Image (tube, grey):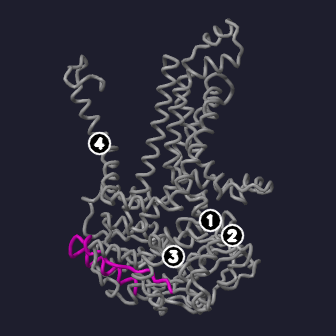
Amino acid sequence: MMRAPLIQRSAMPGLGLSAGITLSMLSLVVLLPVGALLWQGAEFGAANIWDTLNRDRVWAALWLSFRLSFLAAMFNLVFGVLLAWVLVRYSFPGRRLLDAAVDLPFALPTAVAGIALTALYAPNGVLGSLAADAGWKIAYTQWGIFLALVFVGLPFVTRTVQPVIDEIDAEIEEASASLGASRLYTLRNVILPMLAPAALTGFALALARAVGEYGSVIFIAGNIPLRTEIAPLLIVIQLEEYNYGGAAAIGLAMLLISFLMLLVINLIQIWSRRRIGHV
Amino acid sequence: MTRPFNISALALALLAFAPAAHAQSLLNVSYDPTRELYRDVNQAFIAHWTAQGNPTPQIETSHAGSGAQARSVIDGLNAQVVTLALASDIDRIAAAGKLPADWQALLPHNSSPYTSTIVFLVREGNPKGLKDWGDLLQDGVEVVTPNPKTSGGARWNYLAAWAWAEKNGRDPKAFVADLFTHVPVLDTGARGATTTFAQRGIGDVLLAWENEAYLALAELGEDQFDIVVPSVSVLAEPPVALVEANIADDAQRKLATAYLDYLYTPEAQALAFKHYYRAWDASAADPADVARFPKLDLVTIGDLGGWAKVQPEHFGDGGIFDQIHVAK
């Protein structure tokens, strides 16, 4: 619909109406708030933005947020695809229940998730006390943040990959096997290339979600500056000081980094699509 | 507990119902630990107000971090009354033109109908023997406090430590810097810090509002924690004010004024004592509620130079609190 040049009349009726509704909705819900953020940043000025960002504490928080979000999304990429594979390809008792449980991180308020995870992994919690015996601290360290980010990001990969696995006919694998390919070869050169674009989309979604996550992380993080302080918390702190400009500055930095990361993921997707030729 | 959600949900609800609001309704925007207090005060006030022949008013109270609440009011939350943790938060609302700059002189006692202070909540039997601020710097002592950047109560914690160091000939900046190296978890609000200390078992001592410490004892069991009162602390004055710009008509002004005046009556003061606040008028209070407050040396915010000076110097962007963390 959107691909058609403006002058050329589309064969499908209703372009004007549907495009109008789409654009108004998109403007109200996405473009205007992002525009307001850019406006706030422009008013603050480039020099002030740089002064706000160029501090050890801000760099540390940005590095922490993006590094842990990336690691959590990587973890979800591997285990989310595996989970999707198990849910689609095997039939076992409780499969539907497990399938439904995958959506829980979507539905649960993030604060509830954060408090539940903290209660479990705090040094006096059920799992936290076991870890503490082994000399491993989870809650109130970067491990805790990682755990919360894995939790909120998990459904994204699984749910994007599931329908794709569903569509891969078992015949393709059989054909590959009958031509003499080993199982590993089939997996690596037949199945994974077909899954890659969807898995990457899921990865990108999980990553974007993790970067902006505040509600669940704040309870388990410990929030110590330079060590366990996430970038979204710094934004809240700036707001708490009525420093809207400073908050916008950090928000813009996060937006820019996220945008660059998503751009790279998109480029990889385009490249992998060209290589495989379909999907 | 997630403030942004609470506030936006509340703002949205108010947005949706704004036309339905009538003169006999009142929104009191308050801070975190006053939930229990205002639940009782509202009930008592409604009885008091209707006893004078007025129709039953609809009084609502919202609670979240003091700064976040002030921001909501500045951004248009239709509160007729604010009862916050810090005068500097109400100063911000005044700076936005919603109430007069001299608001704090309009009601008795710096517009603070009740006060509190900062005490230590320690584990039963005080195993680490923490008696005063100086003891908190011993090796291996873990101190739980919320983040002064996001919590009004934590600013009082910080200032109490500062005041003790000043009075005891220690370099206050070095003292608080050292103190914050003993903090393993910085929660964003007072309630979160109480949970971390009481439920998660983190830390040896919680720096808390006195009322919050007593509440923790009452709710979580007196056999688990002890309250330790340090030799020096701050007189925390959580002030109240009428938000001029949000008063719809004379009837609502009358209601809002009566509500704030009611906070100073012996009945409301008795409720404040009951909820572990140090109020002013004990005439109607249960003597046991009054007697439980030990006497201690209380430093006022005026002694430290007033909020207008303290806020930017200590908690502003790049202020002393930021410096002590960067120096680490």
Where residue A27 is drawn, which disc sits there? 4
Amino acid carrying label 3: it is Ile
* Residue that mark 1 sits on: B185
Q: Considering only order in the chain, which callout, 3 or 1, is on the residue closer to the N terminus?
A: 1
Cβ–Cβ below 8 Å for labels 4 and 2?
A: no
With A221 as the anchor, is B65 left or right in this view?
left
Lateral position of residue B114 relative to residue B60, left or right: right
Q: Tell me the subunit letter for badge 1.
A: B
CA gap, disc 4 to disc 1?
Answer: 40 Å
Asked if the residue under mark 2 is in contact with the one under mark 1, i.e. CB atoms within 8 Å, the reply is: yes
Q: x and y percent of residue A27 in the render?
A: 29, 42
Q: Earlier in the sequence, mark 2 or mark 3?
A: 2
Q: Which mark is residue B203?
A: 2
- Residue in the picture at 25% in, 72% down: B245
| Among numbered discs 1 and 2, the one appearing first in the sequence | 1
In the depicted structure, whether residue B30 falls above or below residue A139: below
The region drawn magenta spans B235-264
For label 3, the residue is B320
**Residue B47: where, in percent of width, then height?**
38, 77
